[in-house]
Amino acid sequence: MFTYSGKLLHIDLSKENIWEETLSQEYVNKFIGGRGINAALLWKWITPESDPLGKKNVLIFGAGALSGTFAPSSGRTTVTCKGPATNFYLKSSVGGHWGPELKFAGYDNLIVHGMAKRPVYLWIKDNKVEIKDASNLWGKDVQDTEKYFYEQFGNERLEIACIGPGGENQVKFASIMIGHNTAGRGGVGAVMGSKMLKAIVVQGKQPIRIFDAEKFCKVVLKAIKALGEFPGRKGLSLYGTAGLVPIRNEMHLFPTKNFQEDYLEEAYQISGQYLSEKGFLINRFGCSACGTSCHRFTSIEKGKYKGTKSGGPEYETVASLGAGCGVTETEAVLKANDLCNRYGLDTISTGSVIQWAMECREKELLSEKETGGLDLSWGDGEVVIELIRKIALRQGIGDLLAEGVKRAAEQIGKDSWRWAIHVKGLEQSRAEVRARKGYALALAVNPRGPDHLHSQVYAEDGTTPEARALIKKICGSEEYASHTIPEKRGAIVRWHEDCYAATDALGLCTFVTLSRGYLVDPQLMSKMYTYASGINIGEDELLNVGRRIITIEKAFNVREGATRKDDTLPWRFMNEPIRSGPRAGMVTSSDELGEMLDEYYDLHGWDKKTSWPFKETLEGLKLEEVARELESLGKIPKR
Amino acid sequence: MIIVQEYKCTGCRACEFACSFKQKQFFHYNYSLIRVIKNKKMEGFFIPILCFHCDEMYCAKECPTDAIKRDSKTGLVTLDKQLCNGCGSCLDLCPWSAPIIDDGEGVAKICDFCQGDPLCVKFCSPGALLVKK
């Protein structure tokens, strides 16, 4: 089987049972790989209404179909499970080199079932799989855990996916760390912690073979050349994602103080440019076969946070732990980022719960007694750092915040839910969507909750000729390349969803396939996949696979009880206008969102009342089994 | 020659993929004649290692079959696969452990500069690898 390893690995931690499954041609044809095959496996292996932190949840790791090759930025791995933050579908995408190594070890996907009785780690080397005792590692942070494995096995080619105390303590937004990269969103680390699985260490020497070497090499070199010539990519290389801070801030689209403001006077101090100019940036890190190398490695050489060293920070991190909490002290933000990485916590959700708590304190919904004597004033970096510790270890108020904003707001009561910036239970990425209508819709319908790595609709901004050309292709006119208008947003979001899903299935990074330049477009993606796999697939069919993936993810949520009311936005964005800047006064009202949802559901062939897919829609996408099961549950809408 | 500007290396390993592809038409770093290692003295940095075609030719010093020589025209160090018995003395003596032993073929290999058109350089987007003719 070209470009694949050809096998899936199952590990049942309850029964200490390990078995292999041949990667079926049907899975490959229908879902390609990575996120796609993971979604199909999740549908198959989860019993509806299972506890996400119970033994019936499965934790699935999937390498992309092109991972382990030199296709540009092709090393992304998808982690999939039922999400503890939302009780719905969850996938978390991560870069680095772990996915390619899993394929070298002989497996495209890894499915972890059950729950161990004691802390364990998995050692996967060349088709040899062992469940090993990890009692001595339980309680260790991520860096110490990695250090242990490097010392133990004496080989720097190990690829390690592990959790820190955040995952062990089942913080609802705990991450899985892969080196300096993070599968951050939705609490995949909590699921791993609930299974008492500390780490998965992989190493292998099985090469990845491809179908047509000459053509594959040629098309990849073409893609690399196009990427190298694109100016936007240079900025990303130089300053990382945090290089977006100054421009977002100038546009008054930089969420500050829990989205109360969208402009921060001292924002430059937490920008990628500043980190570079002031010597905090040590080096840029590249994920597998990624010349863009947007990831950072930063350190602090002097002062009270001396010795801080970590991957990142990303835009989302400085926006959430920094601006969102009103913190502009560079060192404090770097320290907070470092702590999240060591404890294994998602920086977006961690910042989000802290700023929610700060706003509750400001509005006197939280007393100083409840905060354990901590003064939760805006902008105090030390308080943020202290709260990160408390959250990871579930101490004091940290235990409440570790549940995420939705559950914390339910506990505090009163009006605190209004400032809880989440949908479905997942804290939202730091995107101002009162002014960006397509983005607002994308976040509302996102099956894992409001997150940017699922369907960020860059094209609606119309900031590049490529973006405007794409809008014309989708909507028939370039006029729709404006993010403040709600018309045609359904079509724009749907196209992006398809393309994101195809990108994730191939294991590519969305920075090369989407992101302003749209350089590795579906046509180029389909060519790369065809030459690599020998499976002839065109642009339209590739996007259709994307649609199938989106639809089975939606179906998963329907099976778990989701309806139209779950596709919404945080209260603040629908009711509280932007306060300053060129977009002052804008909200994405409930009515406006409703109209966009109607268009979106219609285009998908989903029922407008319930949001559920019609039977013909599922069958048209060859998801007959899904249709049958939903029908048996009475969850197929009537015409 | 391939010039390495190691401070520009981001550890993406595209060069390893390119080289193993060039050698074997498949992908695995074990077959790459260039490999990227972590800089143990400076955390966060990487070092691409490949044959620097050095003047000393440590690799040839104990080669039992005289398989390693310097090409008088190009000045490059070359390894004759027909003569090599795969003993690995070249790898042991090279201060950078630059040669590899190809498991499948049972012989040592060193970077031959792709006959003047190295593929690894084409794939090195960060610009850590340069060709100097």
Image (cartoon, rainbow, N blue to C red):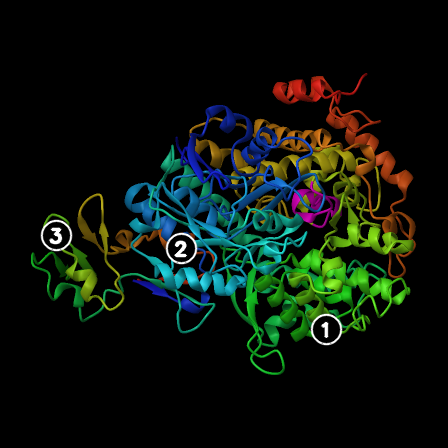
Q: Which residue is drawn at 58% across and 79% down?
A: A306
Magenta stretch: give its range.
A448-463
Give me the chain letter of mark 3.
B
* Quadrant housing residue A221: top left
Q: Where is residue B63 in the image (x, y as percent from the top left)?
A: 10, 61
* Gap in angstroms between the C-alphas marked 1 and 2: 35 Å
Q: Would you say A101 lies left or right of A341 here?
A: left
Please report, as a chain letter, where disc 2 is located: A
Q: Name the residue under label 3.
A: B84
Q: In this view, does A560 lie above or below A258?
A: above
| Amino acid type, callout 2 | Leu
Indicate the position of residue A174 as horizontal and vertical percent values: 63, 54
Q: Which amino acid does the dot numbered 1 rest on?
A: Gly
For mark 3, give the secondary structure.
loop
Q: Distance between the residues labelled 3 and 2?
A: 30 Å
View extreme (left): residue: B65
* Residue A450 belongs to the span the image colors magenta: yes
Q: Do labels 3 and 1 share a chain?
A: no
Task: Identify the chain of the residue marked 1, using the numbered disc in the image.
Answer: A
- Is tag 1's residue or tag 2's residue first in the polypeptide sequence? 2
Q: Which residue lies furthest to the front in this view?
A: A117
Q: Quadrant of the N terminus of chain A?
A: top left
Front in this rendered view, residue A211 or A35: A35
Residue B9 visible, this angle? no
Query: Between residues A257 and A361, which one lies in front from this camera angle?
Result: A361
Which label is found at residue A381? Answer: 1
Circles 1, 2 touching at the beta carbon (< 8 Å)? no
